[in-house]
Image: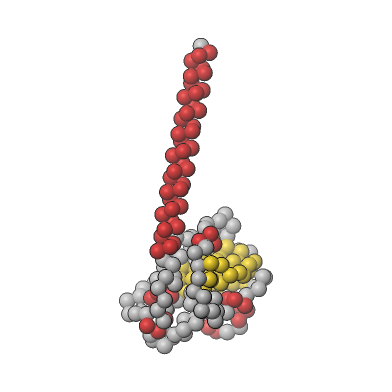
Amino acid sequence: MKKRDKRKKIYLLILVIIVIIIFLLLFYYNNKIVISNIEENNFDKEWIPVSEVDITNVSKNIIGYMSIPKFNNKFYENMPIKNGTELPILATSIGHFIQTPLKDGNICFAAHNSGKNSKGEYVGFFDSINKLKNGDIIYYNDLSNTYTYKVINNKVIKENDLSVLENSKENKLTLITCIKGSQNRKLRQCVVAIKI
């Protein structure tokens, strides 16, 4: 009887180890897909002046709006957000990293910090985020509700620092743009704000 119980325990332990290994492999594989998708959508992979980006077929589907009251300017009220970070989207709106959530968790956005598109519209939606300080407010509207976020960090990161796009249990916004006035295309301005 004791040998049989011992075998059952060994089989159960082996089964648990196999399940854990399968879970870890699936987790690794899924994260690798998400990271490779983010790398493919790097919003400044190929540098083309905003005014030369073809926006004739860009989606008109707005998925939300963002407002930054600190700048006290109509331009920063209800800035449109579209899904994706491809160049035509960023030439018309703030872009949402599609691998990140739209409601809870780490919601990530990219935008230009200067330039006019081919229609002559100014699209530097993130032109002043380098001036945001801890405690400054950002409003995000997902077309159903408006949420309030408070800036907790404003830093410079490397363009390949994908850790800022990882999901989190904490509800926050992550805003990314090129460094204002810098020719160094390997760095990005990154603002993180938490939901309050």
| Along the line of sight, the residue nearer the viewer: 152 or 171 | 152
Q: Position of residue 113 (x, y in %)?
A: 51, 79
Q: Is residue 182 visible?
A: yes
Residue plotted at (41% across, 54% down): 33
Q: Position of residue 57 (x, y in %)?
A: 32, 76
Direction from residue 142 to residue 119 in the image, left or right: left
Direction from residue 19 to residue 169 in the image, left or right: right
Residue at the left extreme of this rendering: 57
Residue plotted at (53% across, 83% down): 75
| Along the line of sight, the residue nearer the viewer: 141 or 102 | 102
| Along the line of sight, the residue nearer the viewer: 54 or 40 | 40
Quadrant for residue 138, please give it: bottom right
Residue at the bottom extreme of this rendering: 120
Residue plotted at (47% across, 81% down): 123
Q: Position of residue 101 (x, y in %)?
A: 48, 60
Residue plotted at (50% across, 71% down): 186
Residue at the top extreme of this rendering: 1
Q: Position of residue 153 (x, y in %)?
A: 63, 67
